[in-house]
Image: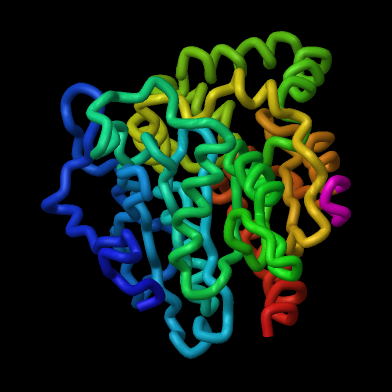
Amino acid sequence: SIMQVSSKSHLALLNSRQWAPKRLGVPRAPVCRLSRQGVKAHASPIEDMRHITADGWGLELLLQRAEDPSAADARPPLLFVHGSYHAAWCWAEKWMPYFSSRGFNTYAVSLRAQGNSDCISSEKDTPVVVAGTLDSHAKDLGDLIAEFPKAPVVIGHSFGGLILQKYLSCMKDESEGSSGLPRVAGTGFVCCVPPSGNKDMVFRFIKKDLWASIKITYGFVFKSFQKSLDAARELFFSEDLPKEELERYQKQLAACSPVRLIDLSDVNKQVPLPLPPAHAPPAFVLGGEDDKVVDVQAVQELAEAYKVKPIILPKMAHDCMLDTRWEQAASELEKWLMDTVLPATK
C-alpha cells in the first residue's frame, strides 16, 4: 500500500462498521455515504483510514487507489482538502473516482472536528468550539503529509485553499536544509479564498447585490443550507444540478460540520498572507463565474500571487467538485497535472 500501517506512521486501517466517531452530544453514524452517481463503475473501492496526529486527534482519511498501480508508482499521490461545512466525502463523490481512474492514488482528509474526524482529542477529553486556526490546520496537514512515501500534490477548496496557502508559507526549503513543514509536489486551488481573506469579497458582493449578499451571509451564519434545499443550492450549486443530487449533498452538508472549521478572528489577524516562497511548487488556480462565495476577482488575486493564469469556468458554482459540470473542472486539473507536475517529478 502507499502508506505502511504501523504505530510509527500513526495510520490505522479503519473498519467503519465497528468505529463510532467522537461527537458533541449523541454519537452519530459516519456521515460519508457515497453513491458516486454519474461516475463509471470503479474497480478500486474507497477505503476508510484513520490518521492519528501527534497530539492525539483522529482524522478521517479516505483512500482510493489507482486502477493502474504501475501508473501510480510513477506519479505523486493527490491529497484533497475541503473547506468550511464540508469534509472528505465531497471529494469521494466524483473527483476521487475520476483521478484514480486516471492513474493517481487519491486521498481526502477531514480536518479535525469535521466529517468523521474527532471532535474530542484522545488526550484532552474536552469538546472544541471551533476546529482550529490556519496554523493548527496547516500543522495537521504537515503531520499527515510527513507519512506519505513521496510528496503529494495537495488540492484545496474554499477555506481549505487558504489553509494550503498558510502551509506553503511554512514549508521547508530542502535546498537550504531549513526546518518547516514537509515539501509538496504541487498545489491546486479551486474556488479558494485569496491571500487577502474574505472581507474584500464580502464588500464586493454587497456592492454588487445587497439582497443576495444578505441571503448568502445569513446562509453561512445561521446554516440555513442545512435545512433549506434552496439555500444549499444558492450557496454551493448551480440551478441545473438535479434535485436528487442536491438532496443527497445537503444531507452531507448538514451532518459533517458540528463545529466551525476555522477561527475567523485568527484569519483576520493573519491576512493578507505572504506571497508564496521562492521554493513553492507549481500552482493551479481555478474558479467559477457563478460562484456566489468566492468571486472571480478573488480567483484572479490568488492567481496573480502565484504568477499563474487562472482558469475561470462558465456556469460553475462554488462546489466545483460536485456541481453539474464537475468534470470540466476535473479535466482542467488533470491537464495541469499531466503538463506541469508530472514532468517536474520525473
Residue 53 image position (x, y, % from top left): 37, 49
Q: Viewer-proximal residue, 210 or 155?
A: 155
Magenta stretch prevailing secondary structure: loop
Q: Viewer-proximal residue, 126 or 309?
A: 126
Q: Looking at the picture, does residue 148 appear above or below residue 18? A: below
User: Magenta span has 307?
Assistant: yes
Evaluate whether residue 247 shows in this view.
Answer: no
In the drawing, does residue 289 fall left or right of residue 112? right
Q: Which residues are magenta?
A: 304-309
Image quadrant in which the C terminus is located: bottom right
Residue 78 image position (x, y, % from top left): 54, 65
Look at 65% across and 39% down and name the residue there: 162
Look at 74% across and 29% down and name the residue there: 271
Evaluate whether residue 333 shows in this view.
Answer: yes
Residue 252 image position (x, y, % from top left): 37, 37
Look at 39% across and 25% down and name the residue there: 259
In the drawing, does residue 327 fall left or right of residue 289? left
Residue 212 image position (x, y, % from top left): 68, 15
Q: Residue 163: name its quadrant.
A: top right
